[in-house]
Image (cartoon, rainbow, N blue to C red):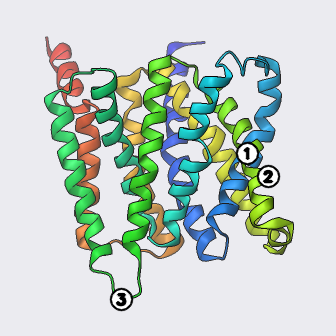
Amino acid sequence: MPRSTGVLGGFLAGCVLALGAPISFAAARAGILAGITPGDLVLLRYLVAGLLLLPVLLYLGIGNLAGIGWGRGAILLLTGGPVFALLQTGGYAYAPLAHGGVIAPAGVTIFSTIIAAVALHERLSRSHLLGAGLVILGIVLIGCEGLRAASGERIWMGDMLFVASAIPWATFTVLVRYWRLEAVRVITVVSVLSISVTLPAYLAVAGTNHLLSLPMGELSTQALVQGGVQGILAMLGYTHAIRVLGVSRAVLFPAAVPAVSVLIGIPLLGEIPSMAQWLGLTLVTIGLLAAAGVPRRLLWQRKVCLS
């Protein structure tokens, strides 16, 4: 395969994440506004991903969980499975897309950096610290709307759920990095284990009558987006982008998630951000790029080209 074709494929794979994650956020918000509960969305996400990836787990070996092991698999389930998904999805029951699409990804970046520095003793560069500061400032600006909300509105509760969801996912991210696990194996194990836990819990709490009472068209759409697009394609796309493009270019795609989320929400949901939210979004995007070291890498590459 020509190198140019491989690079193009890497960029297209990265775009799957940059578009897939915001689409799933927007679909979750739209589904909740239409009467779908966060529990319904979590069930659909893992039902689709778990069933589709079950043959992969059987091929890789279910006895030792695709080489990951049951002990590590249980920890990955707790940090990157239904608990995380329920917290993140539950936030959309209270807060608009502009909040979740920005706070959740930015929170993961901040908490991942902190956990990696403490647990893995990774040195924090100036760009990391500067980016983290900008991200926190941007989140504060976006969250101010929740604190100023009219009596009876609970936007701030959604913001807190988004922040809370970032903690287990950040832990999950650091563990995957620390254990040097392959993304395909991790996604497969977490998806299959998640549905084995989520389905019995859902049937015990909500029951089949509730599920059957929901509109089939909405359920089908959410199953496709949450389970297929976000649960499988977006994560695999990012993995392929890293392998083909390298980290320095692949990090551009997750940094685009907040901006794309907000832009998708305007025509789809009619949720137009306020001036404070636009400013917060700008600060978060710049902060994510700075934390990833993108400006420094671009300056270095320009210097190399000029020399």
Cα distance in 3D space between marks 1 and 2: 6 Å
Q: In the picture shown, does residue 207 fall above or below 5?
A: below
Q: Residue at x 59, y 24 (%)?
A: 72
In which quadrant of the rendered view does residue 68 lie? Answer: top right
Q: Which residue is mark 1?
A: 197
In which quadrant of the rendered view does residue 278 lie? Answer: bottom left
Which of marks 3 and 1 precedes in the sequence? 3
Do the residues bearing badges 1 and 2 touch, measured as CB atoms within 8 Å? yes
Crowd around label 3: few <14 · some 14–19 · many ≥20 (10 Å): few
Percent position (x, y) of residue 227? 69, 48
Q: Which residue is mark 2?
A: 200
Q: Which residue is mark 3?
A: 151
Q: Secondary structure at mark 1?
A: helix
Q: Is residue 196 visible?
A: yes
Q: Is residue 236 visible?
A: no
Q: In the picture shown, does residue 12 fall above or below 134?
A: above
Do the residues bearing badges 3 and 2 touch, measured as CB atoms within 8 Å? no
Screen quadrant of the C terminus: top left
Mark 2 is on which residue type? Pro
Mark 1 is on which residue type? Val
Mark 3 is on which residue type? Ser
The mark lying in front, picked from 3 and 2, is 2
Percent position (x, y) of residue 66? 71, 19
